[in-house]
């Protein structure tokens, strides 16, 4: 079994492609994060203030979106990578729910986002807050937006997995 697990959520397939490439490059295992209620195309229309994703993303810091209880056990992994799109500058609220359910103590965690126009600073702060809320003792690497081959390569090198 690989020492690294790549978990990802992908609404449109973009994050899935990056997660698969990372898993292949690291010889890591990979698993998808599933919301209890999948998102429709209408749910993701960021031009409409009343759509599901817009309403969810504008929740307070403790906002969560339920996920299916099908995450793999982390018992055999030292490293966990979580990939997600960036919605409204932060990870989808289901990423916080994912972190809540993972047994991350003693693990090394790295996160990445996919976006064509947003940086990772707000997403990193969001992840750090969720780690703190769970009182995890985890080594958290600096995340990044991975939207090119060079960004992927540079970020993987920085992880030193």
Image: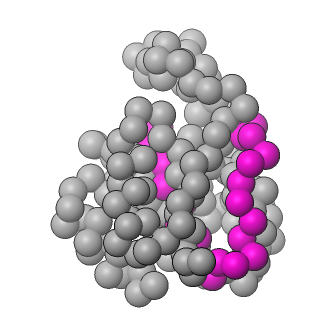
Q: In terms of image quadrants, where is residue 128?
A: bottom right
**Magenta span dominant secondary structure:** loop
Q: Is residue 14 left or right of residue 62?
A: left
Q: Does residue 97 sit above or below 56 in this rendering?
A: below
From the viewer's perspective, is residue 130 above or below residue 95?
below
Image quarter of residue 26? bottom left
Q: Nearer the viewer, residue 26 or 56?
A: 26
**Quadrant where the C terminus is found in the figure:** bottom left
> Magenta stretch containing residue 85, yes or no?
yes
Image spot of residue 144 (x, y percent): 38, 63
Counting from the top left corner in percent of width and height, residue 127 is at 60, 60
The picture places residue 82, in percent across and down from the top left corner, at 54, 60
- Is 7 contained in the magenta span? no
Number of numbered discs present? 0
Residues in magenta? Answer: 64-90
* Residue at x 70% of width, y 66% of height: 131
Image quadrant containing the N terminus: bottom right
Q: Is residue 71 visible?
A: yes
Q: In screen coordinates, is 138 left or right of 140?
A: right
């Amino acid at each position: 079994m690989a020492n690294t697990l790549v978990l990802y959520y992908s609404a449109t397939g973009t994050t899935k492609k990056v997660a698969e490439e990372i898993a292949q490059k690291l010889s890591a295992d990979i698993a998808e994060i599933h919301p209890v209620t999948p998102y429709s195309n209408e749910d993701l229309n960021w031009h409409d203030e009343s759509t599901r994703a817009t309403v969810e993303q504008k929740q307070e810091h403790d906002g969560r979106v339920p996920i299916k209880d099908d995450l793999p056990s982390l018992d055999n992994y030292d490293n966990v990578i979580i990939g997600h799109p960036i919605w409204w500058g932060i990870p989808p609220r289901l990423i916080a729910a994912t972190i809540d359910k993972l047994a991350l103590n003693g693990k090394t965690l790295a996160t990445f986002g996919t976006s064509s126009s947003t940086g990772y600073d707000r997403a990193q702060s969001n992840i750090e807050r969720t780690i703190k809320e769970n009182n995890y003792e985890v080594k958290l690497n600096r995340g990044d937006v991975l939207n090119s081959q060079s960004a992927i390569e540079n970020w993987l090198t920085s992880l030193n997995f």
